[in-house]
Image (cartoon, grey):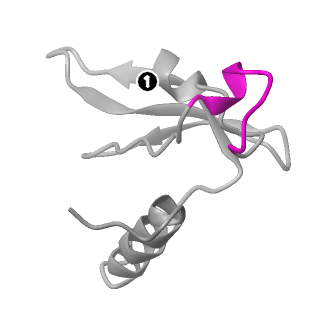
Amino acid sequence: TCAASDRTGHALLHTLYQGNLKHNTNFYTEWFAVDLVKADDGSISGVIALCIETGETVFLQSKITILATGGAGRIYESSTNAYINTGDGMGL
């Protein structure tokens, strides 16, 4: 187990981000996943997403879909979590 005081999540985020940069991973930051799209065989074929900046809604087709949605700490009145940690991704 690895721990970095109360910044373990932050350290993990940076480690994963640097590793993905080496593999030219596409990142969609400031996008909101609206729904997962299933293929006929039941596998996930992509996601319907909303660009927060422009309001555009698009279908992002993919072979692999990874949702890095964060937690749901903001369901509580008192939390040190970021304001965006509303748990919406868990609902997908």
Is residue 48 found inside the magenta-colored segment of the image?
no
Q: Position of residue 79 (x, y in %)?
A: 72, 35
Which residue is found at the position 61% from the left and 35% from the top? 49
Asked if residue 11 lies left or right of residue 23, the reply is right
Q: Which residues are magenta?
A: 72-81
Specify the amino acid type for callout 1.
Answer: Leu
The secondary structure that dominates the magenta segment is loop
Residue at the outermost bottom position:
22
From the viewer's perspective, is residue 82 above or below residue 23? above
Asked if residue 92 lies left or right of residue 1, the reply is right
> 8 or 43, which lies in front?
8
> 4 or 46, which lies in front?
4
Asked if residue 42 lies left or right of residue 16, the reply is left
Asked if residue 49 lies left or right of residue 62, the reply is right
Q: Position of residue 7 (x, y in %)?
A: 53, 65
Which residue is found at the position 33% from the left and 42% from the top? 65
> 42 or 85, which lies in front?
85
Q: Quadrant of residue 56?
A: top right
Q: Position of residue 85 (x, y in %)?
A: 65, 36
Q: Quadrant of the N terminus?
A: bottom left
Instruction: Estimate how packed mark 1 is, as few (under 14), some (14 to 19) or many (20 or more) residues with alpha carbons within 10 Å.
Output: some
Q: Is residue 92 visible?
A: no
From the viewer's perspective, is residue 83 above or below residue 72? below
Q: Is residue 38 visible?
A: yes
> 2 or 16, which lies in front?
2
